[in-house]
Amino acid sequence: MPTLTKAGLLAAMLFTSAAAFAQAASPVGLWKTIDDETGKPKALVRITEENGALQGKIEKLFLEPNVDQNPKCVACEDSRKNQPIIGMTIVSGLKKDGNEYTGGEILDPKKGKVYKSKATLREGGKQLEVRGYIGAPMFGRSQVWQREQ
């Protein structure tokens, strides 16, 4: 079995570091959403990439013990009406545009409203600023999500 030279070991270390940085530099992964009004965790959202566009599905909700643990989107007005919120796609269509991901939509299951959205990685990929808006980005709200994986 061949032994690694110092150059080979250094190359392997650099490759591993580059792969870890590339993963952190992408929104793909599991995110804890934080309510911008209360500051409390709301959900875990898994962001995946398909055909160059990001989508996000709710994997878990952080709910009080005395409420329905598998709520439905009763306020939704599209095909998601009365569907379980856990497993629901709430982010779709975000595409890389420079340092941002733009051109997408985000659903607020509590209000049943769909907004235009954009997202920006922060803190070296540890945070994701997600903005939902009507019309122009200046007319909206942002949340900062925390990377879980």
Image (spheres, grey):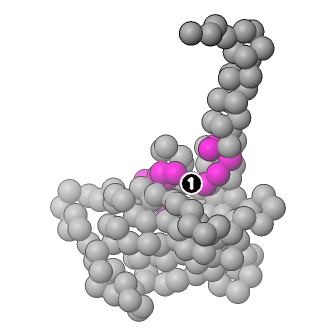
Is there any visible trace of residue 75 in the rendered image? Answer: no
Q: Residue at x 57, y 62 (%)?
A: 49
Q: Residues within 10 Å of mark 1 (few under 14, many from 20)?
A: some
Closest to the observer, 32 or 50: 50
Q: Position of residue 67 (x, y in %)?
A: 21, 65
Q: Position of residue 12 (x, y in %)?
A: 68, 23
Q: State yes or no: residue 30 in magenta.
A: yes
**Residue identified by numbered label 1:** 28
Q: State yes or no: residue 92 in magenta.
A: no
Question: In the rendered image, which quarter is residue 59 located in?
Answer: bottom left
Closest to the observer, 73 or 67: 73
Question: In the rendered image, which quarter is residue 100 located in?
Answer: bottom right
The answer to whether residue 124 is left or right of residue 98 is left
Q: Amino acid at mark 1?
A: Val
Number of marks present in the image shown = 1
The span picked out in magenta is 23-41
Q: Residue at x 65, y 29 (%)?
A: 16
Is there any visible trace of residue 58 in the rendered image? Answer: yes
Q: Residue at x 23, y 68 (%)?
A: 70
